[in-house]
Image (cartoon, rainbow, N blue to C red):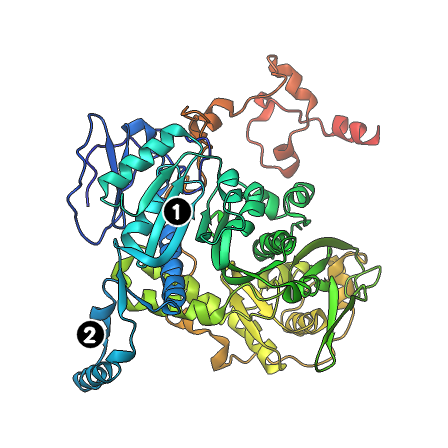
Amino acid sequence: IFMETEVPASNPPAASAESTADGTGQSATSSTGDQEKTPSVGLLPGETVVKEGKAAILFPSANEVFYNPVQEFNRDLTCAVITEFARELLAQRGVKVVVPGEQERVVVSLSEETNEAEAQAEEKNGSEEPAVKAAVGEKCEHGLRVLEGLAASGLRSVRFALEVPGLQSVTANDFSAKAAALIARNAQYNGVSHLLQASCRDASMLMYDMRGKKDRYDVIDLDPYGSPTSFLDAAVQAVSEGGLLCITCTDMAVMAGNSGETCYSKYGSVSIKAKYCHEMALRVILHSLDQRAGVYQRYIQPLLSVSVDFYIRVFVRVFTGQATVKNSASKQALVYNCVGCGAFHLQRMGRRTSNGKHMKYSAATGPPVGPECEHCGQRHQLGGPIWAESIHDLEFVQKVLSAVSGNPSRFGTSKRIEGVLSMVTEELEDVPLYYTVDNLSSTIHCNTPPLLQFRSALLHAGHRVSLSHACKNAIKTDAPPAAIWDIMRCWEKINPVKREKLSPTSPAFKILSTEPSFEACFTVREDANPQSRKRHLTRFQENPQAFWGPKARAKAGGGISADLQDKRKKFQNKRKNQITDSSQLKTFPCKKFKQGTCTHGDECCYSHDLEQTNEQKIE
C-alpha cells in the first residue's frame, strides 16, 4: 500500500462544517489493505490518496488531509460489529452474508476428517440454507440501509461499502457542500457509487425526515467532534425497529467529571471525577440514549460499549414497546461516591416487582448510605443518573470476537480488537463501575498489593471479580465496600503503615482503626489470572504516536484550523500581565530554596528571605 502524494506531518486538517472525530487529523498515514484495486477515476493535479482497509480516499491537496490514523481501530471495530449485526438480521430475511477470508479460515482450522464431515453436512443441509447470498461490494435488495450522519471525507462509508456484506444502500451525509462533493468523488474513485450516495444536509433534519417511515435506516453511525447529544433525539426516531445506533463521544473532559454541570446540561446526568470515570461515561451516554428513546415509547439494548484512547463508543439496538419502556426507571441509578475513600453505592431510580403474572412499579427507597461514609467518615458526592444494567450483550460480543480472531487478516487492528473484546467478555456484566488497586492502597498509604493477590483474596472470600477494559488496574467485584476494606486492612497488617504519621481525621486513620471482620487469604489462585492476561493479548496498547489524541476542530466553510502543537508553542510561557522588571520577582518566595535545592544563589530571580516569607504568612 502506498501514498501517491507525500503529506507533510505538520499540516493541519482540512475542514468540514459537521466535522467528525475520526476525520480530524494532521498527517495522512497509509494503512494496510487486503488488495490493490484499479481506481475508476483518475487523480487530479495535487490530489492526495490515503488508504485504509480496502478504501482509498482522495483529498484535494496535501495540506487538506482530514484523517486521523489512530481512529482506524474505531472504524475496524464498527465494520466488524455491523457485519455481525447484518449476519443476524439478514438471516431472518433469508439472506446469508459472505465475508472474504472466512471460508478459508474454516478449511485451514479443521482437520481433513472434520472437513469431510462438514462437507457432508453441507450437502445434507444445503436445501435449508438461505438461497440468497450477499457479498461485499454488492447491492442486496433485502439488505441494510446505512446512514453516516457526519461523514466528512466519507472514509467510513466507503469502507462500509467495500468491507461489509449485505448492504442495500449507504448514505454519507455532511452539512458542507465541499465535503459532500468530496464524498461523491471518493465513492466514484472506489467504484461504490451503486451503493454509496452523498448527501448535503443537516444531519438532524435528514434523520427527522425519516420518522415514521417504513424504510428507516437499519444502521445509523454518528461520530461527531465532541458531544453527539444534539443528534440523539433524531437518531432514536430515524432508526428502524431493532436497528443499530453506533455513537462516538469525544468530549471526555465533560463526561469524566471535569464539568459535571455541563455533563448534566448535555446528557441529563452529573458526572463524577472518580477512578471509574471512563465506565461511568459509557453509562452516562447509555442513560441519555434510553431517556430520549423512552419519549417515543422506544428502549435500547446495548450490544457493545467500549472506552478506548480518547473517546467512548457504544453500539445499541433500538426497539419499540410501551410495556418494556416502563422498566426504564429501574434501569437507571444514582451514584453515591465517598470523597474520602472512594467507596460507592448505587441507588436505583425506580423499583419493579413481579407477582407472577404482572409487574408492579413503584418508587425506589433510599438512600443506601448515611450522612457520612461508614468507613472513613467523609461526605458523599451525588452523581448520575447512569445506566445501571449491562453495557454489553456478551453473546453478541463473543460472535464478533470469534469472527475477528478467525479472520485476522481482515482488519489492520485485529490484534487489538481481539484483546479488547476478550476483556469485555470477561467482565462481570451485572456489576456497575469498579475500584482500582492503586487508589485503595493510596487511601490508607500502604504498599500496593499485586493484582493477582488482591483478586485471589476476593475469590477466597467468596466474591466474584474481573478486570475492566476501561482501566488496566481496575477491580470489578460484587464484594461490598466493607469486604474490600477488610482485605486492605489485612494487607496493611502484612505491610504495616506508620500510624503515628496519620492524621486522626484522615480516611486512612479511621479505616485502619477498625479491625477486619475476617482473615483475608492472599494465596494466588489459578482462576485469579484471566485468559486475556495469560495469553498476553493486546489489551492496553502503548501510545501509537506522538500527539495521537483528538486533533484541532475543523473550521466551518472549508477553513483550516491551526495546529494544536503550534498553538501551544505560541502561547507557552505567556502571562496576562507580563513582568518586565526581574526585580519584581523577588517578592515571591523561592520554593527550591525552601527545599534546599536552589543552585542559583544571589542570582536567583525569587526571594531567599525566609523571614520575609514568614512575615507574609503571619499577615
Q: Which amino acid does the dot numbered 2 rest on? A: Val
Q: Is residue 555 left or right of residue 358?
A: left
The Cα atoms of the two marked residues, 1 and 2, are separated by 31 Å
Q: Which residue is mark 2?
A: 108
Residue 523 on image: x %, y %: 54, 80
Image: 147 above or below 456:
above
- Residue count near mark 2 (Cα–Cα under 10 Å), binned few <14, some 14–19, many ≥20: few
Residue 315 can be seen, yes or no:
no
Please state, as top left, top right, bottom left or bottom right, where the C terminus lies in the image. top right
Residue 565 can be seen, yes or no:
yes
Q: Which residue is mark 1?
A: 71
Q: Which mark is residue 154?
A: none
Q: Quadrant of residue 61?
A: top left
Under tag 1, what secondary structure?
A: helix
Q: Residue at the spot x=19%, y=46% of the render?
A: 1
Residue 476 on image: x %, y %: 58, 68
